[in-house]
Image: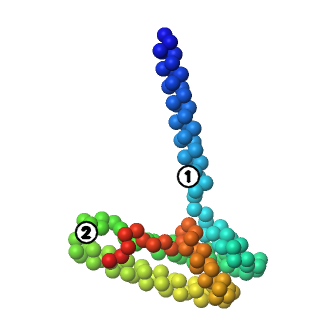
Amino acid sequence: MKNLIRFCMLAVVMMTVSVNTFAQKAERRQGGARPSAEGRAQQIAKEIALDDATTKKFVEVYSQYKNEMRTLGSRSQQGRGTRSDAETKEAMKENLDREQKVLDLRKKYHEEFSKFLTPKQLERVYELDAKRPGGQRPQKGGRP
């Protein structure tokens, strides 16, 4: 009888610990969500100490920039080792086309940002953007 009670108590303790651990993981996932482009723009504007009027313009342009970047999608990683030569060639062409579109978009928005930011502020924006969620990060594995 004592062993049965001990076993039940142990089971209750184990269930309590596992439920608590699961709840903490769920909290982390919710808290770790990437902020919106507008939220990142507000953070960057605060870090480079923009005035209210410039912040408003920056948030608007930065949000447009990030949304357009998002619509371009990411590089194709699908079935990398299992593609035929023709599929690999086509995927490489698509990636190069995408990279050209990204470069064109960056040039376009560089001109937009240059209208109301100084070169030093713009340089700092690029640095901060690279460190923020959604910023440009190096690809895993590198390129050939």
- Residues 128 and 33: in front is 128
Task: Categorize mark 2 by other alpha carbons within 10 Å: few (<14), some (14-19), many (20+).
Answer: few
Q: Which mark is residue 5?
A: none
Q: Position of residue 142 (x, y in %)?
A: 38, 73
Q: Is residue 57 visible?
A: yes
Residue 34 versus residue 20 in the image, above or below: below
Say which quarter of the image contains residue 140: bottom left
Secondary structure at numbered mark 1: helix
Question: Which residue shows up at 62% across the image and 86% down it?
Answer: 112
- In this rendering, would 88 be left or right of 121? left
- Residue picked out by circle 2: 83
Residue 14 versus residue 43 in the image, above or below: above
Question: Which residue shows up at 54% across the image and 26% down it?
Answer: 12
Question: Comparing marks 1 and 2, which lies closer to the viewer?
Answer: 1
Q: Position of residue 30 (x, y in %)?
A: 59, 52
Callout 1 amino acid: Arg
- In this rendering, would 86 be left or right of 127? left
Q: CA distance from mark 1 to mark 2?
A: 34 Å
Callout 2 amino acid: Arg
Q: Which mark is residue 29?
A: 1
Question: Which residue shows up at 30% across the image and 65% down it?
Answer: 79
Q: Position of residue 106 (x, y in %)?
A: 53, 83
Sequence-first tag of 1 and 2: 1
- Residue contact at pointers 1 and 2, CB within 8 angstroms: no
Say which quarter of the image contains residue 87: bottom left
Residue 6 versus residue 35 in the image, above or below: above
